Amino acid sequence: MEFNVFEYFKGYKRTTRGPMTPEEQGTSFFLAGHMGEQISERVDTCAAKARLSRRNFLGTASGFAAAMLAVNEITGMKFFEVTEAEAYDVAAAQDIKVARKPGSDFIVDAHTHICWRKDGYIPGVNTSERGMWFVQLLDDLGKAMGLPNGTKDMTVENFGKLILEGSDTSVAVFNPFGFREDYGGKDMIPIEEQAEVKQRWPDRTVMLAGGLTPNQGLRETLDRLQMFVEKYKISGLKLYTFDSTPKRGWWFDDQKQAYPIWEKARKLGIKNIGCHKGIPFGQFMARYAHPEDLDAACDDFLDLNFIAYHSAWPYQNELAALKGFKPQRKNLYCEVGSTFAATVTNRPLECAHVLGTLLRDLGPDYVMWGTDSALWVNPQWQIEAFRKFQIPDQLVEGHGYPKLTDEIKAKVFGQNAARIWNLKTVASAVPADKPRVVAV
Ligand SMILES: [Zn+2]
């Protein structure tokens, strides 16, 4: 069966304990995909070689390596840089992990969230049916990944535990959710609650504001932007061009509705403006998830950077064309949150094409790391998977993609984000052999 993250966890009820390590979280996605059965057989063989029960083996770094090795064997392509020894020799796999000294990577997660607010989400009271659909999706995903209370556990407190202390992430860029039409007239995550994240971890977080849509009234939108900057000292914006108003969406290149926002942002010193693109989920209209409106916005506001979240997947080719054919462009960025997670474990060829296309056309200086955690709970398995991921030689030769060298990975992991957010490139101090918290 094909793995679809929007279907797979629907109505998820946990009957056994959740994954206990990041490796086990990652492996569980490999096992859930259409290659799952074939991967499972190979994982069992490796577990027997390691003389461990399947259950215990899945919690080790070898279990994760075994799943990746299985994908290389099944597809006949080298998607993961992983050795046979790692896949059954638990000590060898652990050595490779620990050999990566703290500080060897500077990792900026461009895409992180809390998914709970103090008022909660009460259907019919402060949350519409459409609003509940999204809350439920996040809830199911969280429960599957080890949070016993789903969304209720995606709090400020656990943001720190899972992302800042539980993974190799050095700095997390905090993303908002708005859609207040669906949440009783209040943003799904109100700015004052987001601000708690910044207050608690001022050096390790970058705070973006959102919940701005000109369809709620342009005057009000501009006033809110000013308030975000003056009162909350935000660093940038993460917006959604589909919205929950009767108009259902808007465009970044709308000269009447959107350009006044960019002009105001420029005046207020806000330079980085992100937008959810691609992943046209749930109650929202897919047309607004296409990235074509970034074209004129980029040209008309050369001093601002525009960031396509999710890299517009599955419309990444449209996004890449905005630079592939206009190589002079220097203010169009993308990040890979949820896109990498949803493809790497079960559509590795698609994952390689997406990354290859972005790196070739937007360029290695414009692609940024992101995980969309805490939707995916602890991001560590995604970090480990990207460290090992490769664009196979056949695709490098046949499509002109760059190879995923350490140098390119370092740019994607943190250097590009450090440049646009003015971050000091100090890596996380959490040692590689410290156990990672994956459940709370
Ligand atoms: Zn997100």
Image: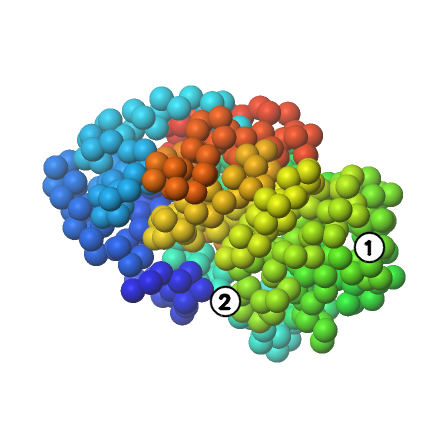
Q: Position of residue 18 (x, y in %)?
A: 34, 53
Q: Is residue 228 left or right of residue 151?
A: right
- Helix or strand or loop: what does disc 1 sit on? helix
Residue designated by label 1: 259
**Where does the image place residue 339, in percent across and percent down from the top left?**
48, 51
Q: Amino acid at mark 2?
A: Gln
Q: CB of mark 1 within 8 Å of CB of mark 2?
A: no
Which is nearer the eye, 187 or 111? 111
Q: Is residue 409 above or below residue 188?
A: above
Write the residue at 31% across / 47% down. Answer: 27
Q: Is residue 82 visible?
A: yes
Residue 90 visible (yes or no): no
* Residue shown at the point (29%, 64%) measured from the top left: 1
Q: Position of residue 150 (x, y in %)?
A: 47, 59
Q: Nearer the viewer, residue 231 or 400?
A: 400
**Label 2 secondary element:** helix
**275 or 118, which lies in front?**
275
Pointer 2 residue: 136
- Mark 1 vs 2, N-terminal side: 2
Q: Amino acid at mark 1?
A: Tyr
- How many numbered marks appear? 2
Question: Dot 2: within a 10 Å radius of its alpha carbon, few (fewer than 14), some, or many (20 or more) residues?
Answer: some
Mark 1–mark 2 distance (CA, rounded to whole Å): 35 Å
Crowd class of label 1 (few under 14; some 14 to 19; many from 20; radius 10 Å):
some
Mark 2 close to ligand 1, CB under 8 Å:
no
Question: As displayed, is residue 360 above or below residue 279?
Answer: above
User: x%, y% of residue 7?
Assistant: 41, 67
What residue do we see at 20% from left, 33% from top?
84
Give the residue at x 47% y 23%: 104
